[in-house]
Image (spheres, helix red, strand yellow):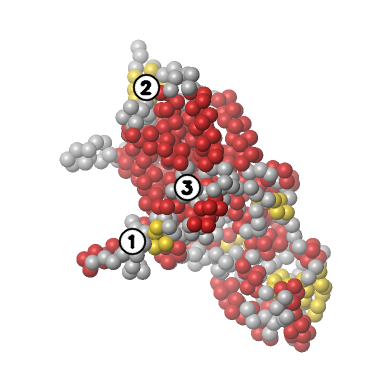
Amino acid sequence: METTSLTNGRKEIGGHEEPSRAGAVSTSSSSGLIWPVLFFLVLTVIMTWPLVLDMGRSIVGQYGDNLYFIWLIGWFQRALFVLHQSPLSTSLLNFPEGWNLASTEMSLGMVLTGLPLAMVGGPTLGYNFALLTSFVVSGVTMYLWVARTTRNRWAALLAGTAFAYSPFRMSHYLVGHLNLLGIQWLPLFFMGLQETLEGPSRRAWRWGLVTAVSLSLIAASSQYLLYMSVVISAFVVLASCVKGLTPALRIAFPWTRILAWTLPALPVVLLISAPYFSAANAGDLPVRGVEAAARYSASPTDYLFPFSGHPLWGSWIAQRFNKSNWVEASLYVGFAIGLLAFVAFIMRNRSEVGPRTIWLHVGILMTAFVLSLGVSLHWLSRPVRVMLPPALQFLSADDGESLAMPARILYSYLPFYSSMRVPMRYGAFVQMAASFLGGIGAAHILGWLGPRWRPAATGILFAVVLLDFLPPSTKLTAVQGRPVDVWLSRQPDTGAVAQFPFDEADSEAQAYIYYTLVHHKPYIGSLSGSFQTRQYNRIKSVLEHFPDGESLSLLRRLGVRYVIVDALWYDSRDALDDVQVAMDQLGARLLAEVDGQLVYDPSP
């Protein structure tokens, strides 16, 4: 006897989904994933060209945060397989106090993805492998979600393309934010969450496990993304609990379905997050003021203007609009995807997906959009100044002149929310929801067209999306230590390294952290520009006056054996002679001069 049920607007017959339509695809077996994986693999090579030509030695763009993540992969490799110790903290940075890596993002999932390749070809190869893999996985997970929802492989590939190569991902790729490329797991999490909450009850625990695993992968990629995912999923849970618009607005909590994913997820997520809780208790986790959040609050216009790195019209955008914070503000969802998402919305009552699913993801998009606006309203990257009457002053932001946004409440009352300084990163969820809805819109259009016009329409849609998201032309930069770091690697492993001028070393902290992979000696610096340690705050004011008696005395107390002086920097300011005379008078001994770097032993 046949039975029918409705799941996400799709008809099931006898417990099986209805036969495939034109353009439909099965995602029930691994063979159904071969072509999507190959598609996104080839497209990733093209969109990140020429990185694949020199993955073991070079990075895209210039030195920056990419070097920190290369160091992180190299440090994990050395800690686990050479030093046989926990890699979660290190005494080689911020020496001698040491550095708790949980004071910033450790991105365990991305590090472990790159670790096998790092053991074969070095940390740069591991970093690039993890980076490129994230593009492929992003496309595939979005493909799975849209293909399951629409049963249309072309619409699913289009949505995966929009999500994987969006300006959000491309901008963070260009500067090496490996942790934020972990948005690859978001589609899998929200697909599993929706199926757990609203799918057939007999499958709730199976989908709950998918949801739990994907949330754990998000936690391992980025605590930022974990926290934001939990906040957005709270909206999904509440929206799924609304059983109908009645005068009483009945809400019933399906506790069994909620426990189906929270129970298996909780222990793993807590285990991954434990180092961060420990860092918070020790005072090592930075707490941001609302001023920092205001600087990184998105403008609605950030979603409308194309990527400033676009090779055709990006420079025109950059010249006419404030794009100084282009990395975080690259939130453009795409003209074609935005239009297709709108098609999905206006055709929601005729869609086989069902209006409830579309409304749910419109809600996700709007929730993420509002939260990305941060603590105060901005327009064109500038605060919107308003004069509110006394009765409405409670709507003012902390500066008394801007309009406060709902996220201001979260910064005040949610634990750890104030540790997130960049609310713009909710834009990843906006892009995810827009890509999903765009896939539904594309499926509707392609299903409406006849076989004669469908191939041409598919080609046009792909051409427009790819044109909209064309990446900038990029150059490769070799990742290597300096000659002085090679020289240091041959010296006795006694004492730490300090680099001067101290301010310059601070502004290029990622590079000097990476150099420790070359010389393997403790370094008194750390990622101090964004995450200032207690030791850094104590010593900075003294070391800024180097070279004098007080700064040299401090270096000796810190256990510094090698003081590296950038002779070219001081010479360009006619100060090199003064430095050399002062070091000689203070009893420091010149050990070597290597490629414009003077190495002193500060011991008397």
Label 3, residues with CA under 10 Å away: few <14, some 14-19, many ≥20? many
Q: What residue is shown at x 60% (from left), y 76% (from top)?
A: 540
- Image x and y of residue 341, in percent: 41, 37
Amino acid type of disc 1?
Answer: Ala
Instruction: Please tell me in which quadrant of the rendered image residue 561 appears.
Output: bottom right
Q: Nearer the viewer, residue 49 or 520?
A: 49
Amino acid type of disc 3?
Answer: Tyr
Q: Nearer the viewer, residue 373 or 260?
A: 373
Decide if residue 374 is in sight here: no
Badge 3 is on which residue?
A: 332
> Tag 1, which secondary structure?
loop
Q: Quadrant of the C terminus?
A: bottom right
Badge 1 is on which residue?
A: 404
Which of label 1 and label 3 is nearer to you?
A: 3
- State yes or no: discs 2 and 1 in contact (Cβ < 8 Å): no
Q: Earlier in the sequence, mark 1 or mark 3?
A: 3
Q: Is residue 199 left or right of residue 128?
A: left
Q: Is residue 55 left or right of residue 158?
A: right
Badge 2 is on which residue?
A: 11
